[in-house]
């Protein structure tokens, strides 16, 4: 079985079983009620996550879905298709990197990813749906293995 | 009967891993020939710490460095569980404490607690107690006028410290709206705005690098528990950066030679310990079956209660600058 990734325009098409587990993982990791967690929420700005919370979220998702989330997964996915193109210059994203990130994170509004923004600022654009999509990607990969 | 506790740590760096290999008489790790991920090697007791005949604690280490702890949390969890179970073979254990990243991985200790029948505690209450008391010492030395900023207030320790300082009657400003919820505190847009104009700033985040040093008022004192520092760069001239989680030990505290070496290598220095180390001690002495801090759960009332018990055993928060006691 294959699952579809969510985009900005298709957040309401989430698989209910996967979304339920993702929601629980976020709620438990961030000490929130489940109804306080929505797919479109920005994890840092709207759910007040700190960097270590990402570690906790990843651990809970790994256990819930029996998957292994690689460190730097989203950035690595973006870099994977870049060949010889440059991802960053002096810590700032290149045009090519932005193109790849927009493809890797269709759940993030494109205008939030701009050339010149700092690499460290990319995490601030992460939505709950970013992790939903990461889980879906890993589940699809696992199913096809 | 002497209460017994275990404190689980990991290698803080590849150099520390070599020390663990040396201590465990595991030449392949001591010489750097193995990376510590071997499931059977290197796990073992580093030292035994004693508080008179009241408590005895064993520090057990797994030879995984920070990168290895974070890249595969399940693997780290299995190693920590094994270390705890091996320690339990030496006698009954009243509590298990977690040091450094051991307190962060696996749902901030929750996954290890699911696997062990004794209370597992992260050290959060002890850290919050030391930070709260050390901050109060600075505020009292400064005359306690003005506002104290708590940076990293969304983390459990930060929220608890903001709560305690507010309950004590201080004007508190936090950098996070969630931390402000339900508290009588000021809310700033971000860390820099929270610290602006404050003579005393508390760095309470679990990880550092949140506060631009240029945002600090001239002459400010930063009381910090973040690792690395809460500041994104060196402290400006005139700004003092003090360690907020050091604790001095009563005269009956004794770790022997290996204990002293451990304290130095772990960054405590010879005359103090980090507060988190004594949290399982207090738990074990009291026979309390509920951890003071686990996962994100950390209540201000538990911090107060912990502090009362720790002080009754002779431990005192110690405002430190490096290994030395800070003079205000």
Image (cartoon, helix red, strand yellow):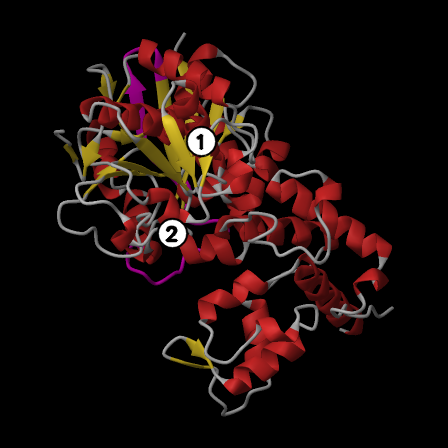
Tell me the crowding category of disc 1: few under 14, some 14 to 19, or many 20 or more residues within 10 angstroms, Cα based.
many
Mark 2 to mark 1 CA distance (whole Å): 20 Å
Instruction: Name the chain letter of the residue that bears numbered label 1.
Output: B
Task: Say whether residue A77 is magenta.
Answer: no
Residue behind mark 2: B210
The quarter of the picture where the C terminus of chain B appears is: top left
SS for dot 1: helix
Q: Determine whether B35 is above or below B244 in the image.
A: below
Please name the residue shown 36% across and 24% down the image: B170
Image-based side of B125 in relation to B324, left or right? right
Labels 2 and 1 within one chain = yes
Above or below, comparing residue B119 to residue A55 in the picture:
above
Mark sitting on residue B150: none
Please tell me how crowded label 2 is: few (under 14), some (14-19), or many (20+) other residues with Cα within 10 Å. Answer: some
The answer to whether B208 appears left or right of B315 in the picture is right
What subunit carries mark 2? B
* Residue A45 % position (x, y): 56, 53
Identify the residue shown where x is 73% and y is 42%. Answer: A34
Q: What stretch is highlighted in magenta?
A: B30-55
* x 24%, y 43%: residue: B265
- The front one of B159 and B74 is B159
Residue B31: x and y in percent read 28, 59
Residue B124: numbered disc:
1
């Amino acid at each position: 079985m294959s699952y579809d990734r969510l985009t900005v325009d298709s957040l309401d098409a989430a698989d209910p079983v996967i979304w339920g587990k993702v929601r629980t993982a976020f709620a438990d990791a961030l000490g929130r009620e489940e109804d306080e967690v929505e797919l479109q929420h920005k994890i840092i700005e709207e759910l007040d996550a700190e960097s270590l919370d990402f570690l906790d979220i990843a651990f809970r998702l790994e256990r819930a879905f029996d998957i292994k989330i690689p460190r730097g997964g989203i950035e690595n996915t973006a870099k994977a298709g870049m060949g010889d193109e440059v991802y960053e210059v002096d810590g700032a994203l290149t045009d090519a990197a932005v193109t790849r990130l927009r493809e890797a994170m269709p759940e993030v509004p494109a205008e939030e990813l701009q050339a010149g923004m700092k690499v460290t600022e990319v995490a601030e654009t992460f939505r709950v749906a970013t992790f939903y999509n990461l889980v879906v990607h890993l589940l699809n990969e696992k199913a096809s293995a | 009967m002497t209460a017994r506790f275990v404190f689980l740590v990991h290698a803080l760096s590849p150099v520390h891993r070599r020390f663990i290999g040396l201590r465990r008489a595991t030449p392949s790790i001591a010489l750097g020939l193995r990376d510590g991920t071997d499931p059977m090697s290197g796990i073992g007791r580093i030292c035994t710490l004693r508080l008179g005949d009241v408590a005895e604690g064993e520090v057990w280490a797994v030879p995984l460095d920070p990168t290895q702890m974070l890249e595969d949390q399940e693997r780290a969890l299995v190693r920590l569980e094994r270390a705890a179970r091996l320690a339990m073979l030496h006698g009954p254990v009243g509590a298990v404490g977690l040091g450094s990243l051991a307190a962060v991985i696996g749902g901030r200790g929750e996954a290890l607690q699911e696997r062990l029948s004794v209370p597992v505690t992260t050290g959060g209450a002890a850290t919050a107690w030391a930070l709260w008391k050390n901050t109060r010492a600075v505020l009292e030395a400064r005359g306690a006028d003005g506002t104290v900023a708590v940076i990293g207030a969304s983390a459990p320790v930060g929220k608890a410290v903001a709560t305690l300082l507010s309950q004590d009657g201080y004007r508190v400003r936090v950098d996070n709206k969630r931390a402000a919820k339900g508290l009588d505190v000021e809310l700033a847009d971000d860390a820099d705005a929270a610290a602006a104009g404050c003579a005393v700033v508390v760095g309470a985040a679990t990880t550092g690098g949140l506060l631009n040093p240029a945002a600090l008022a001239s002459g400010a004192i930063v009381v910090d528990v973040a690792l690395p520092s809460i500041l994104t760069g060196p402290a400006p001239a005139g700004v003092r950066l003090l360690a907020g989680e050091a604790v001095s030990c009563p005269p009956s505290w004794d770790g022997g030679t290996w204990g002293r070496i451990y304290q130095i290598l772990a960054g405590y220095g010879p005359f103090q310990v980090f507060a988190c180390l004594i949290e399982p001690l207090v738990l074990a002495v009291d026979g309390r079956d509920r951890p003071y801090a686990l996962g994100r759960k950390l209540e201000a009332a538990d911090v107060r209660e912990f502090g009362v018990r720790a002080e009754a055993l002779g431990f005192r928060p110690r405002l430190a600058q490096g290994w030395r006691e800070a003079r205000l």
